[in-house]
Image (cartoon, rainbow, N blue to C red):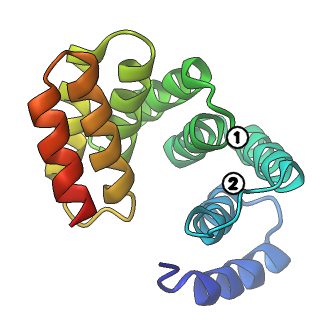
Amino acid sequence: GYGHNAEAAQTLQAALTRMPDNSMANAMMILCRYRMFEFSAFATSSDVKDELLNNAKRALSLDPSSYFAHFVMALVTQDLFGDYTTALIHAETALELNRGFAPATAMAGIAKIHLGDPQSGLRELRSGIAVSLEDPHRLRHQRELAIGHFVVGDSQLAASTIDKLVR
C-alpha cells in the first residue's frame, strides 16, 4: 500500500518550499508520488507520467552526480514508459556513483531481462533482492523474476515464483 507516503510528501513539500533546487528532495518527491500511483487500481494518466518524467529530468539537471536522481530516472522511464534502454543507462550510472545501491542493481537486472540479456539480468535482480528483502518494490521484483525465468526457458521456476507471488 501507500505506507507513509502522504506524510513523506508533506515533509518533502516543506523541504522543497525552503530549498526548491535540492536535487535529493526533488527526487524523493518523485518517488513518493510514483508510489502513490503505483498501488492504484487505475492506470496512471499520461499527464501524471509526463509530470513525473519532467520532474525526474529536473532533479537530474540539479545534480547530475546524484545516484538517487539517476535511480529515479531509471524507475520512471522503465515503469511508466517501458523504456528499458534509458532505464538501464540510468541504473548503471546510479551504480557507478553508489556501487552498493541495491534498488539500482535490481532495476538494472529488470532492464537486462527485457533487453535480451536474461541470464545477467536474473543474476543482478537476485542480487538486488537479496540485499533488501523488505524493498517496497519486492512484489514487482518477484513478477520480473518470474518473467526472467520464463524467458530463459525455466517455466517450472517461473510458475513457482508466480505461485509464491500470488500467495
Q: Secondary structure at mark 2?
A: helix
Tell me, yes or no, whether the two marked residues, 2 and 1, touch with CB atoms within 8 Å: yes
Query: Toward the viewer: 64 or 78?
Result: 78
Q: Is residue 98 visible?
A: no
Q: Disc 2 and disc 1: Cα gap in Å?
A: 7 Å
In the picture, measured across the screen, residue 75 lies left or right of residue 115, that is right
Q: Quadrant of the C terminus?
A: bottom left
Coordinates of residue 96 in the picture (x, y in percent): 40, 27
Q: Residue furthest top?
A: 116
Which of the 4 quarters of the picture holds residue 8?
bottom right
Residue type (three-letter) at the residue carrying disc 2: Ser
Coordinates of residue 49 in the picture (x, y in percent): 78, 49
Which residue shows up at 27% across the image and 27% down it?
A: 148
Which residue shows up at 14% across the image and 49% down it?
A: 130
Residue type (three-letter) at the residue carrying disc 1: Leu
Which of the 4 quarters of the picture holds residue 28?
bottom right
Is residue 151 shown above or below 126?
A: above
Is residue 30 shown above or below 97?
A: below
Q: Earlier in the sequence, mark 2 or mark 1?
A: 2
In the picture, measured across the screen, residue 167 lies left or right of residue 85, that is left
Which residue shows up at 16% across the image and 57% down it?
A: 164
Quick one: label 1, few (<14), some, or many (20+) residues within 10 Å? many
Coordinates of residue 6 in the picture (x, y in percent): 63, 86
Q: Read off the residue under disc 2.
A: 23
Q: Is residue 148 visible?
A: yes
Q: Residue 60: which numbered mark, if any?
A: 1
